[in-house]
Image: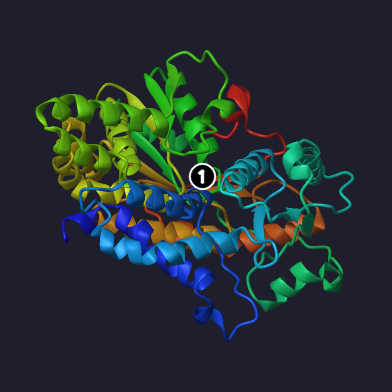
Amino acid sequence: MEEQFSGACTVEIAAFDEFSKLLGDPAATVEFDHVIFDTAPTGHTLRLLTLPSALDQFISSSTGGASCLGPLAGLEKQKALYAATVARLSDADETTVILVSHPDIAALREADRTRGELEDLGIRNLHLAINGLFDAECVGDVIAEAMFRHDREALTGMPATLAGMPRTTTPFLARGTVGLDALRLMVNPSIAAPQSAARMLETKLPPGLAGLVDAIACAGRGVVMTMGKGGVGKTTVAAAIALALARRGGKVTLSTTDPAAHVAAAVDAGVPNLTVARIDPATEIRNYTEEVLQRAGAQLDAGARAMLEEDLRSPCTEEIAVFRGFARTVDEGKDGFVVLDTAPTGHTILLLDAAEAYHREVMRTQGEMPDSVRQLLPRLRDAAFTHVLLVTLPEATPVHEAERLQNDLARAGITPFAWVINQSVLASGTQHPLLCERGNYDVPFIRRVADTLAVRSALIPWLAEAPVGSAGLAGIVV
């Protein structure tokens, strides 16, 4: 049992149990009028929401007893609770699921992907919340005009399936969304004080990305991983660094473990020395399953083979299969640079956590541990080989999440190479009063990162032109 509970899936199951108690057990919330559940990042949330059907299929098809999820008896007791949870999630009279997005093309594309996957689960009681829409008078200020245009183009070009959903909009708030005053402004923006002739505060800013790229390029090979909260710009930073390394003559692979996989859209095709790839979960699961059955299945009798096939149908198989692809991609750093645009924090940590328990899982399924997996943790811990970049925005929640991630990495023996502060209004050059007020809001978060949290840091300003394509990406490595 201890061995079976050591895998990464246990975290998912434990979290979903608590989630299910809030939704599926009326006694747990009988004293409350409302339950508001602030979910984890998209990929992790979808993993939780899809577990009930996966578990149900796994339990109903199981014949061999225990699995990587622990004793089946424990799961059987939860089946009614899981079924009640999914039923309540999809009941429009009981539940509203709110998809929150910035007015940004990539963010809205991700929201639409989430909408589709939720609807596949029978959850159609959805509402779209657009957060931070810049709608101020902006004539004469290049940054303000660009921000206004960016937001409007994103809304105009959003997928039709999102555009047809019920929608609410929260305006751009200069002082962020932390604290009771800010929350009241979100509900009633008209109570905001009149804009003053705000001016940007003067403060020492971290340098740009070029210095970090130069330091990484000196190694001649290795792995670069961008990590952080979803929506902070990990894909853009990863693509910009990959392009800059390729232009310095390095052989570079840009890849992702993110289910959303937006890296290909960020980079022009045909860049010399640069290959764009993806760790595709469906492909990894299929290859892993075929490999295990080929190696071990022929030597088993019918009963033993059925048990093996049962294990391979478990929800843990995806974690193992994707982890192998992750390790294989890191291994390619021996012969050049690999830049990994990683998944949102929770999923990434599950992949890293799985390293210690991975060998137990492959032993159970009669698999073999590739050398790339054996070498993975030593390579991730080798500061000369792996450069972890924590990407954040100069805001409270992204900085807090990145700090927590840094602590998690420290427990795994991994030290970040640098922090990257993305989309700083303070450094944008705007003179618009509302944006100046927002730029001043950046200051304490920039200072906390640069002076306290990071060994080294870099800063990217909010840009009037979106950093897409080779020219746009090259513009942020300065």
Dot 1 corresponds to which residue? 207
Please determine whether, in this image, residue 395 is positioned above or below residue 35. above
| Colour scheme | rainbow
So how many labels did they put on this image? 1
- Quadrant hosting residue 307: top left
Q: Residue at x 33, y 43 (%)?
A: 319
Q: Quadrant of the C terminus?
A: top right
Rendered location of residue 48, percent (x, y): 45, 55
In this rendering, would 245 be left or right of 128? left
> Badge 1 local density, few (<14 within 10 Å), some, or many (20+)?
some
Q: Residue at x 67, y 43 (%)?
A: 108
Identify which residue, 382 or 229, lies in the foreground. 229
Please determine whether, in this image, residue 244 is positioned above or below residue 34. above
Identify which residue, 100 or 235, lies in the foreground. 100
Identify which residue, 163 or 329, lies in the foreground. 163
Q: Quadrant of the N terminus?
A: bottom left
Rendered location of residue 235, percent (x, y): 52, 37
In this rendering, would 350 be left or right of 121? left
Task: Look at the image and tell me whether residue 310 can be seen.
Answer: yes
Rendered location of residue 335, percent (x, y): 27, 21
Please determine whether, in this image, residue 106 is positioned above or below residue 354. above
Rendered location of residue 188, percent (x, y): 82, 71
Task: Look at the image and tell me whether residue 416 can be seen.
Answer: no
Q: Amino acid at mark 1?
A: Pro
Task: Identify the secondary structure beneath mark 1.
Answer: loop
- Quadrant hosting residue 361: top left
